[in-house]
Structures are given as structure tokens and as C-alpha cells.
Amino acid sequence: MSPEKSQALCKQFPSLFSKPVTFYCGEGWCGLLQKLCFDIAAHATAAGIRPTVVSVQEKYGSLRVEISPEDAHIQRLLQAAEDASEKTCDVCGEPGALLDDGVWVKTRCPAHS
């Protein structure tokens, strides 16, 4: 993800990004990350917890976000974001599918496959 988009996300959710985080994922997942952060921040406020994002990366073609501490609700939100990323092009955000070329697994739409 571009530094501009990752910085904007960190500024929008400062409580989640209280420590520096490098985003190792494509621009197409920015919307998924924004929704995930919104949902986690709302839950954290309601539950009285202070989760922090530890890492954001693509792994085996899907979005992986590590947060500490996490409760069962946050785990469900993380899993939902991972599942959604497997159907969302990591380049543009359009509907996509997991593609395995024998070396890398990526989630891409027809235009970026």
C-alpha cells in the first residue's frame, strides 16, 4: 500500500496505530482495512479495550492483520476481513479470486490476473 494511503489510515485510527506499522499489502485492500479498523475501533470503545495493530500483510493471497490484544469478537472481524480479501483484487479492489501460479498466490480480478 502506498505511504500516503497507509498514513491516512493511521491518522484516521490513531488509537489502533499507536506504534509504527508497515503495510505489506496492495492498494486494493485499503477499503477492507478501513472497514476492519472502523469495526475494531467501535468494538474497542464499547468493550473498553485498547487493541493495537502489530502487522498488516499479504500472506498466501489473503490479508493478514495482527492485533494485540484481541478478543473473540476481534478474531471474528479479522477472519471476516481475511475471507473478504480472498474475493477482492489486491491491486484495484474489484471482485477477484485466488490465483496460484505455482510460485505465488495472489487475489486478482480478471483485469489484473
Image (cartoon, rainbow, N blue to C red):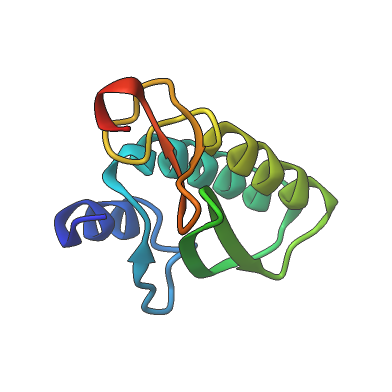
Which quadrant holds residue 60?
bottom right
Q: Which quarter of the rendered picture does the C terminus lie within? A: top left
Report the side of 90 relative to 92 (left or right): right
Position in image of residue 38 (x %, y %) = 50, 41
User: Could you tell me residue 46's position as x and y percent?
Assistant: 70, 45
60 in relation to 50, above or below: above
Q: Left of 37 or right of it: where is 1?
A: left
Q: Is residue 107 above or below residue 47?
A: above
Q: Position of residue 111 (x, y in %)?
A: 25, 23
The number of callouts visible is 0
Camera-nearest residue between 15 and 108: 108
**Residue in the image at 34% along x and 30% along y:** 93
Residue at the spot x=64%, y=36% of the render?
Answer: 83
Whether residue 73 is visible here, answered yes or no, is yes
Considering the image in quadrants, where does the N terminus appear? bottom left
Residue farthest to the front, as pictured: 102
Residue plotted at (50% across, 70% down):
55
Residue furthest bottom in the image? 19
* Residue 40 drawn above or below residue 58: above
Residue 51 seen anywhere in this rendered image of the structure: no
Query: At 56% from the left edge and 59% from the top edge, which residue is drawn?
Result: 65
